[in-house]
Image (cartoon, rainbow, N blue to C red):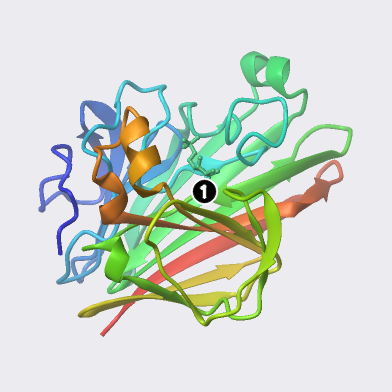
Amino acid sequence: MTTHDAPQQPRALHRTGPCEFGGLPAVHLRSPDGAQATVLLQGAHLVSWIPAGDEEQLYLSPETVLDGHTAVRGGVPVVFPQFSDTGPLERHGLARTRTWTLEQATVRGEHAFAVLTLEDDAETRALWPHAFTLELTISVDRRRIEMELAVINRGDTPFEFQAALHTYLACADVRRAQLEGLLDQNYHDKVLDQPRQQWIDVVTIAQELDRIYWESPRQLLLREVGRKVEIRQTAFEDTVVWNPGPERSAALPDLPDDGWLGMLCVEAAQIGNPVRLAPGEEWTGMQTLEVQT
Ligand code: TA6
């Protein structure tokens, strides 16, 4: 599989604990059976996932800017509290460009996991006037990775938010990939800016595709020759499927012209029904990826 190898890919033999990735502070996970993942402190951004005995499963643009504050192109950006440009905040909200705190990185039983948190500060409150804690827990073992996002309202007034785990899956050639499991689903086609329904049972990519599937199934399958990745989500109600296609790929400065061929975003998302959290309440959503044999 071609993953459009990024020069920043981690060396294979890191152990679980703090590391550097492309010069940025990160944490590396390695389970006893050899599954690995690397997460930047910026954005709690997962940039690499290699199941045991397998190869890289995430797309990371070789042209992404790794400067500690510019949004990273690829991996798994954490979107919060605003999806895309649906509100007044910067695109996809304020979590992906901020530095999170590494709370824990350890191996327990068969799993290696890390917990990262982000709390409001004067800067976030100036943009979005709420007291919150985000907690992202990433756990790997064998052929599976789990990403769990918790949102806690620490203030004394309710707030509403959208969120997503904006997963860029690597593809050998996206034109030959199939995403299964969305038959009959209603979606908003962002390219056409129209509501639509999925009439055929697979989604394939030949050009730009940008869709929000509403209240989507909790389990999908990405199928390529010789590879199957199961994509599951809990609590996240919607699923976004995005590929920039050739024209947008060429227009995006942090993506190679042919970058679109190597990626497919399948995002566990909460967009249509923003979550309302009362003071002290917590919401948790999860995306799980598992490579099938
Ligand atoms: O989740 C899909 C999407 O909102 C697309 O519309 C596309 O623009 C993509 O996210 C990437 O957004 P970004 O802000 O990272 O360039």
- Identified at 70% across, 35% down, the residue is 132
- Identified at 57% across, 48% down, the residue is 191
Q: Which of 292/256 is in front?
A: 256
Quadrant where the C terminus is found in the figure:
bottom left
Give the image location of residue 259, x and y in percent.
27, 45
Give the image location of residue 144, x and y in percent.
35, 71
Q: Is residue 45 above or below residue 166?
A: above
On the rendered structure, is 147 left or right of 41?
right
Give the image location of residue 285, x and y in percent.
62, 59
On the rendered structure, is 5 left or right of 252?
left
Q: Is residue 169 above or below residue 79?
A: below
Give the image location of residue 2, x and y in percent.
15, 58
Quadrant hosting residue 34: bottom left
- Identified at 56% across, 68% down, the residue is 233
Quadrant hosting residue 18: top left
Task: Specify the amino acid type for callout 1.
Answer: Leu
Which SS class for mark 1?
strand
